[in-house]
Image (cartoon, rainbow, N blue to C red):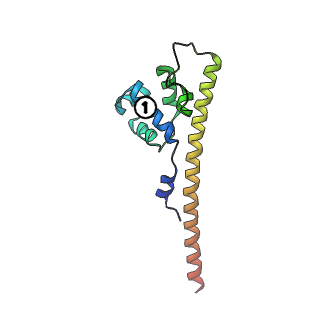
Amino acid sequence: MNTQKEIKDQTRYDLGMAARYSLFRKKYVDENTYVAADMLGITQPTISFIESGKRGIGAKATKVMVSKYKLNMNWLTTGQGTEQIEGQQKETELGKSITDVRTKVLELESKIIQLEKTIKILTVNNDHVIARMERFMNERTK
């Protein structure tokens, strides 16, 4: 039977994407996680959890990185292309929509993984309750 800690340890986000996020943050935002957190409007622990793969990349920081630091979402999600959107290209409505969709997909993936983790924990807890009830019922019938 898996413990809650074992279940947590099994659930990891895309470590490649976490590494790219870390690389981009250090190169274009700030080396210091506290300074970067302030610039991105998130907390320092959030950055640590994202970069260690324990948490998904949220939309809030992603939007700032895209708009202010020209983060290339294709590079972040797939590792293909350049780190930044090239040049001073004016973002088209289609480009904006694609970025918004990718951001939403990242949010949904993060929520799905969190829900899967919660379901696993609930299953473990449910199994534990059933086992206790069975022991109790067996003791009563003796």
Q: Position of residue 141 (x, y in %)?
A: 60, 84
Instruction: Identify residue type, mark 1.
Output: Leu
Callout 1: helix, strand or loop? helix
Q: Is residue 127 among what the camera can see? A: yes
The furthest residue to the right: 94
69 relative to 78 in the view: left or right:
left
Foreground: 130 or 105?
A: 105
Instruction: State the residue at coordinates (48%, 30%).
Output: 61
Quarter occupied by residue 24: top left
Instruction: State the residue at coordinates (51%, 35%).
Output: 58
8 is higher (above) or lower (below) than 108: below
- Screen quadrant of the C terminus: bottom right
Q: Is residue 41 among what the camera can see? A: no
The furthest residue to the bottom: 142
Q: Position of residue 31 (x, y in %)?
A: 35, 30
Question: For the residue carrying disc 1, how many other residues have a C-alpha within 10 Å: few (<14), some (14-19), or many (20+)?
Answer: some
Quarter occupied by residue 39: top left
Q: Position of residue 77 (x, y in %)?
A: 55, 33
Q: Position of residue 87 (x, y in %)?
A: 51, 14
Count of numbered badges drawn on the protein = 1
The residue singled out by tag 1 in the image is 23
